[in-house]
Amino acid sequence: MPACYDAAAIRHESEATPVMTNPIFCAIDRPDLDGAVRLGEQLRGAVGGLKLGLEFFTAQGPAGVRQVAAASGLPIFLDLKLHDIPNTVAGAVRSAASLGVAMLTVHASGGQEMLRAAVEAAAAVPSPPRVLAITVLTSLDATDLHEIGVEAAPLDQALRLAELAAGCGVGGLVCSPHEVAAIRERVGDDVELVVPGIRPAGSAAGDQKRTMTPAEAIAAGADRLVIDRPITAAPAPAAAARTIA
């Protein structure tokens, strides 16, 4: 597994340190293999890794993940948001681990047994991926949660799920930038916080409802930032990524 970005350590480094590991993972949310490979090649050296999600994986499968990883040479964050019975999730984690991905996601709302099964399955393979637990999706707000029977506010629900997942031994959590500071205080520095919903100043929010700028998210305690359209829709994606960094 590629070396992980240690933001907790970097936040305490001397200002004289000349190089900081790039915390940006670019989300490649597209189904076509050629476009994803080309984008991965363009972003080599400009981002810290690539996120491949359901749209790409459904279209291209494991072979597509391998091709993007080989072409880019970057760590892969496989964002499948697994949520099923424990045995099924454990099997999916083992299959994902065989692709050499650095990180993969499960839903914290799957419960303790499912989370522990995912963590144990990851730990049992030679090159274990970091299991990240999704708290509350950045596309959801209080009204959305109410409609699915969750009366807690997004922050309270995220904290509840973060504590549950951290207690099950996950390596990281995925949360809105608006919950980063509170979750960091609650779970400490040992759990990595991976944060989508990142929008540079002046960027459109799109389908994200709880967003923050990159600098604000890092200052709040984020370890990795997941950024999509501000990079992928730019005329020069690598230049856009470097500007954001």
Image (cartoon, rainbow, N blue to C red):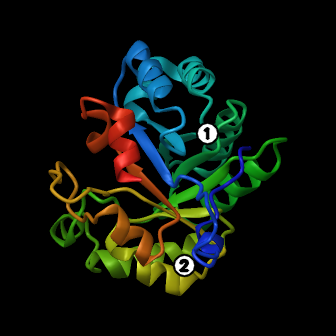
**Which residue lies at the image location 79% right of the left edge and 52% below the top edge?**
123
208 lies left or right of 228: left
Residue annotated with mark 2:
163
Q: Position of residue 228 (x, y in %)?
A: 33, 42
**Marks 2 and 1: which is nearer the front?**
1
Q: Position of residue 144 (x, y in %)?
A: 19, 64
Can you say whether 178 is above or below 92 in the image? below
Disc nearer the start of the sequence (2/1) = 1
Residue annotated with mark 1:
75
Q: Name which residue type carries label 1.
A: Pro
**Which residue lies at the image location 57% right of the left edge and 46% below the top edge?**
104
Task: Give the quadrant of residue 54.
Answer: top left
**Which residue lies at the image location 85% right of the left edge and 41% below the top edge?**
126
Task: Give the quadrant of residue 35.
Answer: top left
**Which residue lies at the image location 30% right of the left edge and 60% below the top edge?**
138
Q: Name which residue type carries label 2.
A: Glu
Quadrant where the N terminus lies? top right
162 lies left or right of 75: left
Secondary structure beneath disc 2?
A: helix
